[in-house]
Amino acid sequence: MTMETLEFQAEARQLLQLMVHSIYSNKDIFLRELISNASDALDKLRLAKLQDGLEADTSDLHIEIEADPESRTLTVRDNGIGMTREEVVELIGTIAKSGTAELLTKLKEAKESPELIGQFGVGFYSTFMVADKVTLVTRKAGTDGHGTRWESAGEGTYSIDDAPDTPVGTTVTLHLRPKDEEDALYDYAEEWKIKEIVKKYSDFISFPIRYVSAAGEEGETLNSMKALWARPRSEVTDEEYHQFYRHISHDWTDPLEIINMKAEGTFEYEALLFIPARAPFDLFQRDARRGLQLYVKRVFIMDDSKELIPDYLRFVKGVVDAADLSLNISREILQQDRHIQMIRRRLTKKVLSTIKEMMTGSPEKYATFWREFGRAIKEGLLSEPDNHKPILEIASFGTTHGEEPTTLAAYVERMKEGQEEIYFLTGESRSQVENSPHMEAFREQGYEVLVLTDPVDEIWVDAVTEFDGRKLRSIARGSVDLKKDASEGDEAAEGDFAPLLTFLKEKLDDQVKEVRLSHRLTTSAACLVSDADDITPALEKMYRAMGQ
Ligand code: ADP
Ligand code: MG
């Protein structure tokens, strides 16, 4: 194959435009992205050798950084898995991820939020924030001596060519933009600057990152390579945890909670989990990445292990390092492994108890947590019948009691004398629920009603029957009239209204099942009520929207 000039895919081009015109204030992150790609490539090579028996020398897996102030170049080199020519075109020339259009809108809005770059997995393009030309030379492990050379100025096209005598791995060379005299902070050709960034963002990378001077002598290792999850909590600073969190989550907001776990005995594992402070943009997208990182005795095995944490806790980030798993473990085996199931149960329990502590210990943090992740948590009421109690205990709901959400425990505390059930009403919005005719008598008589307006609320209320021995009761369904319908006065009234009821029943025959006299209204003349086991109007609408 010879040299070709190819065009970036449309989304990639747009993204590059944003990078070239560098709208971000923190440009340092480009180096973190390159190191993170190099580290991934080293992990992949080690794994290919272990799992697929690929013949490769993995005795000195490392990353090298070389800066040359003279030529104003910065080079990041790894001896990892490398890429074939096809892979370079596919991986570097396009953005395969879904939600790219949405990403671009968000990136344009979020000028000061470099975290979004990594979150969407477009890390490599961030090099164009600091370089006006980027060259990548690579050879895939297990292929013969010639590799591939990719080069671009980030302006719509790139060239790709064969590269003879390329060693296995990938070398990325940035031709740095002219020095900005006013801002020495951005001089990425300087040794001190490189050292500072590596220490700050990539200290825990598990392969040595070596600095090579322009003179070419063997460099010093810049990072400590310490596996953070294996170190006692007391020896690690919050800043170190936060950097690590950024590395695995690509979220630049510090997490709300850091959870360390260590199990010894027949099945040993260590876990380091984070509860983020912000929901990712794709929390409710089906194809979003989720799950924890899995290591076996410090060796990275896989990202996105969904088996380690239930779906409703998918926002939890972190690492599990299990000592007794096989390095060859596949996703299929993970699903059935009973140790993995045990870890998942323990992690779930720990996350729920941490949230509960947060609720009492730092109510403000909890309020943030619930605002960001409450909707996801409530899905657990559908998937995990065994955990109804702990999930309900950490949940909050809108209420007619006030503006702030309430816990069920607080609701129960406030229940009126003689009130036995927990009342709720579902709907599309707070105002819709509050103005519902069903609400009238309850408001009038001072009963508190939970205001449930998330789509998932329609569904879980059918799965959960009680909290703390008290039934959850929809005020829109069945006969929850506050005074008994069949009292004596009613019979008399029923007589008075009998002709009207018969008339209405005839008129509305094919639209309603029954016309009943009721005490649930005070100012409205009539309202529609579902049978206790009918589906609610909103659920009906949802099913209809789904084509059922
Ligand atoms: P992400 O790392 O989130 O996938 P990037 O834009 O950083 O996104 O990289 C795109 C892809 O290019 C990577 O997924 C990887 O397959 C490939 N890649 C990038 N850098 C390297 C490298 N140093 N070695 C091997 N593959 C690489
Ligand atoms: Mg990357």
Image (cartoon, rainbow, N blue to C red):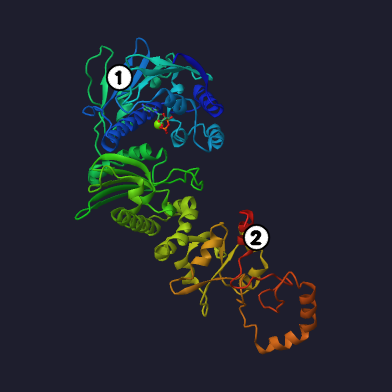
Quadrant in which the C terminus appears: bottom right
Q: Is residue 398 visible?
A: no
Q: Which mark is residue 167?
A: 1
Question: Within 10 angstroms of label 1, few (less than 14), some, or many (20 or more) residues?
Answer: some
What's under tag 2, amino acid-wise?
Answer: Gln
Which corner quadrant of the image does residue 327 belong to? top left
Q: Position of residue 480 (x, y in %)?
A: 60, 76
Taking the spot 68% from the left edge, 78% from the top edge, the residue there is 518
Q: Nearer the viewer, residue 233 or 183?
A: 233
- 261 is higher (above) or lower (below) than 4: below
Judged left or right of residue 58, residue 383 is right
Q: Earlier in the sequence, mark 2 or mark 1?
A: 1
Judged left or right of residue 355, residue 269 is left
Q: Position of residue 87 (x, y in %)?
A: 42, 27
What is the secondary structure assignment of the residue under circle 2?
A: helix
Q: Nearer the viewer, residue 169 or 516?
A: 169
CA separation in Å, label 2 and label 1: 66 Å
- 502 is higher (above) or lower (below) than 11: below
Q: Nearer the viewer, residue 261 or 122?
A: 122
Q: Is residue 481 visible?
A: yes
Q: Position of residue 396 (x, y in %)?
A: 48, 60
Q: Position of residue 166 (x, y in %)?
A: 32, 17
Q: Nearer the viewer, residue 400 or 164?
A: 164
Tell me the residue that label 2 is attached to.
432
Name the quarter showing ligand 1: top left
Quadrant in which the N terminus appears: top left
- 179 is higher (above) or lower (below) than 269: above
